[in-house]
Amino acid sequence: MGTSTKSKKRRSQRDYNMGFKLAVVSQVEKGEMTYKQAQRLYGIQGRSTVLVWLRKHGNLDWSKPQIHFMPSPKRKETPAQKIKRLEKELADERIRNKILNTMIDISDQQYGTAIRKKYLNQTIRKLQEKGQVSLACSCRLFGISRQAVYQLEQRRRQREKEFSQIKPLLREMRMKMPRLGTRKLYYLLKNDFDSLHIKIGRDALFDYLRAENLLIRPKKNYTKTTQSKHWLHKHPNLVQGLVPQRAEQVFVSDITYIKSRERTHYLSSVTDAFSRKIMGYQVSNNLSTEHMLSALKMAIGNRNTKLPLIHHSDRGLQYCAAIYQDQLRKHSITPSMTDGYDCYQNALAERINGILKQEFLITTCNNRKELELLVKESVETYNGERPHLSLKMKTPNLVHEKTVEASFNGFMKYL
C-alpha cells in the first residue's frame, strides 16, 4: 500500500466516490485550497473536474467569477508619526513578551510541557531563516551553544524526511475514512511503516497528527427519533445480560437522523451484535414503518444461516407495528425490546449509527439521492475496511464470515 512521494498516483473516474467528491468540495469551499490545487494534490484527471463537482455538489455559487479589488494606497507617515507609532509598538511588544513568558512558565510548572526545551531551538532556526534574528545573538540570549542547534536541526530534518513518506499514506486512508481514529489508523498502516523502515509508534503518530491539525474531535448531538408512548404491544428485553457467542444470534436496530441541504432524512439500520456488521439499512424522508421494514428485509436477505435469531430494538412505534412484527414471525425471529426509556439497553445500535454519522457522513449532501449513494459507500467501507477495537482490530465482514462458517460446521456436526 506504500506510495512514493516522487510519483503521484493518477486515478480513474471510478475512484471518485461520493464521499471523496463531497470531501474535496468541502475543502475548497472552506478555503483550505483552490480547486486547481485540489486537482494537483489528489491527482484528479480533467482540467475542470473539481469545478464541475463544486457546481453540482457545492453550497456556494461557482457560476460567477470572483472579482478582486485593488486596495487603496496608504498615506505616507511623517517622521513624528512614525516615531510615535514605533514607540507604541515597542511598549506593546514588551508587555506582550512579558505575558507570553509568564504563560510559558505557568504551562511548564503546572502541566510539564517543557516548551522552551522542546521548541526553543526550532524557533531560533525559523527566525534566523527569515532574517529576523542572528543565531549567535539568540544563543547568547538563551545560554545555549550553536552546536546544539545544528544537531537538533539535523535530527529534525531526518524526522521530516520520514514523515514526508507517511503523509501520502495518511491522506489516502483518510480519503476512504475521513474521521478514522488514530489507533485504528496506526493499526492499518503499521505494516506500511515497517516496509518503509520508518520507526514510529502510536504516541508519535498522535503527536504528528496533532502537529498537522489532523486529530479527530468527537461531535456530540442528539435528536429524538423514538416515539414509544403508544398502545401497541411491547415485547420484553431478552438480551439484557446476554453476550452473543456467534454471528446472526442477535440483530439490533435503531433510527437516526441525517440532514441534507434539502431536508432532514432518517437512516434505519440493522446490525449484527456479535460481528458489528451492518446487515441492512434504508434512507427515508420520514419515520414511516415501511422504510424500517425495508432495512429489516435487507438484513434478512443477507443472512447466511437459519439458526435462532433475536431482533432487539427500542420501543418505538415502527418496531411495534403489526407489519414489522409479522415480518419477524414469518422468518421465525424472536422480538426483544428495551425496558422503558433506557437508551443504554440499545447502546450498540446507537453506537453504530454514531460511527456512520461521525466518521463517514460528515459532509452535507444536496439531496436524498446523493445521501443514499454516500450511505451505501460508507456502509461498504465500514463493513469491509474499518477495524474495530472490540473485534481485536478485525473488520466486521471478516468476523462475520468466520463465525458463520464455524457455527454452520458445528451445527452440521451436531446433526
Image (tube, grey):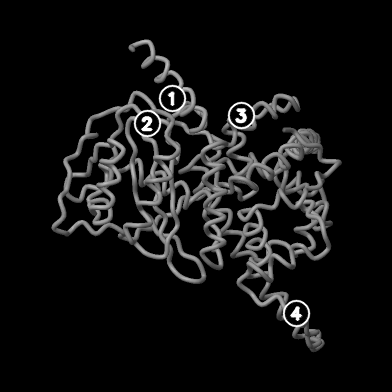
Q: Quadrant of residue 72?
A: bottom right
Residue type indicated by callout 2: Glu
Whole-percent x, y for residue 310 in the image = 28, 35
Mark 1 or 3 closer to N-term?
Answer: 3
Outermost residue toward the top in this view: 413
Q: CA distance from mark 4 to mark 1?
A: 58 Å
Q: CA distance from mark 3 to mark 2?
A: 37 Å
Eyeballing the image, is 1 above or below 220?
above
**Residue for badge 1:** 404
**Residue for badge 3:** 201
Q: Quadrant of residue 155?
A: top right
Q: CA distance from mark 1 to mark 3?
A: 35 Å
Mark 3 or 2 closer to N-term?
Answer: 3
Q: CA distance from mark 4 to mark 2?
A: 56 Å
Give me the residue at 33% from left, 26% from top. Answer: 307
Say whether residue 159 is left or right of residue 229: right
Give me the residue at 15% from left, 50% from top. Answer: 233
Whole-percent x, y for residue 95 in the image = 59, 65
Residue type indicated by callout 4: Gln
